[in-house]
Amino acid sequence: MAAKVLGMAALVLGALPAHADILWLQREGDQLQARIGELSVPGALPALRDAQPVLPGGRVAPMATAADHYSFAPGEGDARFTALRVGGNGVLTYFQARHGRQETKAANDLELVPAEPGGNTFRLFFKGRPAHASRVNVDTAAGWRKSLTPNADGSVTLDTPIPGLYVLEVSAKLNDANVTIDGKKYEDVRYTATLSFEVKP
């Protein structure tokens, strides 16, 4: 993909519609699946570019594609998945998903990171620097939902009383964006980042 980002744009966090599509990772047997839509209603895969799973150490993993998900073997440690959607409405969306909460450093451009391995306090980073979201949305496979307001230091702490899958999501928009892909310039550039993990009974 020929993509070029020009200049430095400010990041506006938590400024996207509450029901925007997200891409998240969940475990199914010995595989991780990347799904898109809403956790309660995953949809068919849209046309995505540069979809790829990334394992610890930056290794790109092979994957299989189905009608409604991608799947890959997760390996050891936290896994990530990135993809790009070029919308017909001129919106460019970077999907950046992470599964696991053992690593305390960010690897994706926009990523929620646990303060300690396996912990329930998280900080948001954009391109390696701390960022401050107006809210962090939480959804669970059990149907429990919550919206967290970050503390003054930008951190959020989450109680996990219900066993099962948790998905934390942050959406952001670049102000004054200038991204060129295949010769076409995009000014509406968005990021959707998720962190998912399982809580055992």
Image (tube, grey):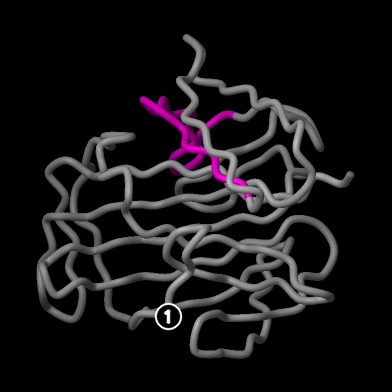
Classify mark 1: residues with Cα within 10 Å, few (<14), some (14-19) or many (20+). Answer: some
Q: Residue at x 56, y 66 (%)?
A: 81
Q: Is residue 39 magenta?
A: no
Image quarter of the N terminus: bottom left
User: Is residue 143 or residue 137 the one in the foreground?
Assistant: 143
Whole-percent x, y for residue 14 in the image = 32, 35
* Highlighted range, magenta: 123-140
Whole-percent x, y for residue 111 in the image = 53, 44
Q: Residue at x 24, y 59 (%)?
A: 5
For the stretch drawn in magenta, what is the main secondary structure?
A: strand
Q: Residue at x 68, y 34 (%)?
A: 114
Residue 113 lies, with reference to residue 41, above or below; the image says above
Residue 67 lies, with reference to residue 34, above or below; the image says below
**Relative to 122, 85 lies left or right:** left
Q: Residue furthest top?
A: 152
Whole-percent x, y for residue 173 in the image = 25, 44
**Relative to 17, 192 lies left or right:** right
Whole-percent x, y for residue 27 in the image = 74, 66
Residue at the spot of label 1: 45
Image quarter of the C terminus: top right
Name the image quarter holding residue 134: top left
Residue 113 lies, with reference to residue 100, above or below; the image says above
- Element type where label 1 sits in the image: loop
